[in-house]
């Protein structure tokens, strides 16, 4: 285990902020804070259901801009090659669309409301995520 | 402010909080994500398990509270997905998403937040992700229920 890079407190705090964000969006707007779903509603817009999504994404980008100024190292680069990250992007894009969610939609929002679909989805993407990360290292694709 | 404006302000605030949470948590560091997913590695970093713990810890409690509010409030939560069946699309989609996550170290939220960094591989991931999402969305049949 990597004890030098073990950061449980900042992880917990970051997670709590994500939880607060999702709670705010649900309580006030009645919307699920699932990023792939929010993006999907911009890429395939339904009338009257776009503006809030754009506002949310602007918020995400703005937080990135603040991070860029205050702590650019926190916006890390993938250790993988260009070809691998493009493939990764395709897997994530297709997968989140087919599976109707990602780590936030299923992992945070779905599990929080005890959705069985989200439990299955989360267990599945955790398993394949672990397998993929391990396989890349074993096959020598890691940095 | 009127309801429309409030909806937008809430969404903006939520996005800011969410992004801040992702950065503070370390989710925008693909190396850290891969270090978490690569459980068999000697230098396994379990930190990110605490992210989902913190998020669910807060959100699950709030959700239960919202459920018990009088019906007009809960009626607004009509966008909560109602499907319950476990189908091939769900499992296949989740499997593919996980592969991508483990390959690149990015999931959608951190990818969007990190776009502003201008890092080449980040932009490439984001572009591929958005294009793929858009393509699948365009190819899907008209009705889509969550």
Image: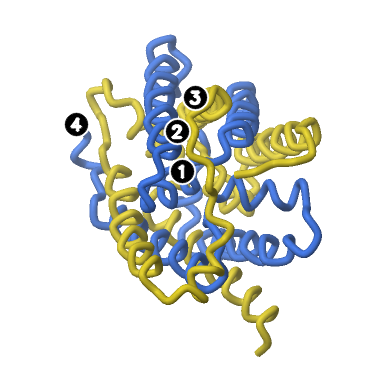
Q: Residues within 10 Å of mark 2 (few under 14, many from 20)?
A: many
Disc marking residue A1: 4
Q: Nearer the viewer, mark 2 or mark 3?
A: 2
Q: Colour of chain A?
A: blue
Quadrant containing the N terminus of chain B in the rendered view = bottom right
Judging from the image, mark 3 belongs to the subunit labelled B
Q: CA distance from mark 1 to mark 2?
A: 7 Å
Q: Colour of chain B?
A: yellow
Q: Left of A4 or right of it: where is B114?
A: right
Judging from the image, mark 1 belongs to the subunit labelled A
Q: CA distance from mark 2 to mark 3?
A: 8 Å
Q: Position of residue B145 (x, y in %)?
A: 64, 43
Q: Left of B32 or right of it: where is A29?
A: right
Indicate which disc, 1 or 4, sits on the residue closer to the N terminus: 4
Q: Nearer the viewer, mark 4 or mark 3?
A: 3
Which residue, given by chain and number where applicable, does mark 2 sit on?
A: A121
């Amino acid at each position: 285990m990597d004890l030098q890079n073990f950061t449980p407190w900042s992880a917990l705090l970051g997670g709590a902020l994500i939880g607060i964000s999702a709670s705010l969006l649900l309580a006030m707007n009645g919307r699920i804070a699932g990023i792939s779903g929010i993006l999907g509603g911009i890429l395939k817009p339904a009338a009257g259901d776009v503006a809030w999504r754009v506002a949310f994404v602007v918020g995400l980008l703005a937080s990135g801009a603040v991070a860029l100024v205050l702590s650019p190292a926190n916006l890390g680069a993938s250790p993988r090659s260009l070809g691998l990250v493009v493939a990764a992007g395709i897997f994530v894009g297709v997968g989140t669309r087919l599976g109707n969610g990602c780590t936030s939609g299923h992992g945070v929002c779905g599990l929080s409301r005890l959705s069985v679909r989200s439990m299955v989805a989360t267990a599945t993407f955790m398993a394949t995520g672990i397998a993929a990360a391990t396989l890349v290292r074993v096959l020598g694709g890691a940095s | 402010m009127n309801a429309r404006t409030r909806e937008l302000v809430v969404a903006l605030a939520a996005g800011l909080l969410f992004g801040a949470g992702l950065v503070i948590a370390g989710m925008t560091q693909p190396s850290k994500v891969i270090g978490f997913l690569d459980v068999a590695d000697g230098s396994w970093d379990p930190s990110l398990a605490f992210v989902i713990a913190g998020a669910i810890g807060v959100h699950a409690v709030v959700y239960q509270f919202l459920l018990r509010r009088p019906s007009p409030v809960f009626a607004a939560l009509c966008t909560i997905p109602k499907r319950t069946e476990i189908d091939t699309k769900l499992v296949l989609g989740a499997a593919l998403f996980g592969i991508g996550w483990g390959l690149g170290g990015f999931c959608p939220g951190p990818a969007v937040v990190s776009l502003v960094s201008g890092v080449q591989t980040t932009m490439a991931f984001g572009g591929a992700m958005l294009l793929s999402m858009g393509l699948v969305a365009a190819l899907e049949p008209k009705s889509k229920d969550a």
